[in-house]
Amino acid sequence: MRPTEYKPMTSKTPSATAEYDAWFRAQVQAGIDAANAGDVIPAEVIEAKAATWRAELTRPQQDALRREMRAAGQRMRKRLAARHSPER
């Protein structure tokens, strides 16, 4: 059994939170079971799809993606630095 599509949490009530938690845990277990059964997508297939996707991007889209990835890395480094700073 493969995990289903992403199901965003739309309510923060306790019953909705518990329902989402149960759904999420079932999805994680389904993924673990699939991986243990060998029902996985080989890395080579993923890499080939990613290469095709990247090749189809226009130059401005590639540049925008690089900028966003760089910015995301900078945000992550700042969070990590703040988390491990001596004054905390």
Image (cartoon, rainbow, N blue to C red):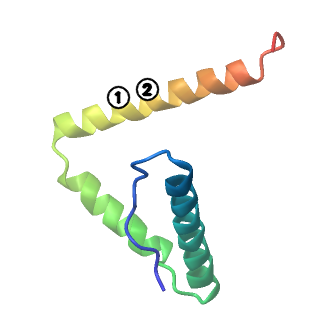
Residue designated by label 1: 67
The quadrant in which residue 45 appears is bottom left
Left or right: 49 in relation to 16: left
Q: Quadrant of residue 65?
A: top left
Vertical placement of 80 versus 16: above or below?
above
Quadrant of the snapshot with the C terminus:
top right
Q: State the image coordinates of residue 50 (x, y, percent, origin top left).
A: 34, 60
Residue type, mark 1 in image = Arg
Q: Nearer the viewer, residue 42 or 79?
A: 79
* Amino acid type for the residue under numbered disc 2: Ala
- Using the image, determine if residue 37 lies above or below residue 2: below
Residue at the outermost bottom position: 37
Marks 1 and 2 in Cβ contact (< 8 Å):
yes
Q: Which mark is residue 71?
A: 2
Q: CA distance from mark 1 to mark 2?
A: 6 Å
Residues 28 and 17: in front is: 17
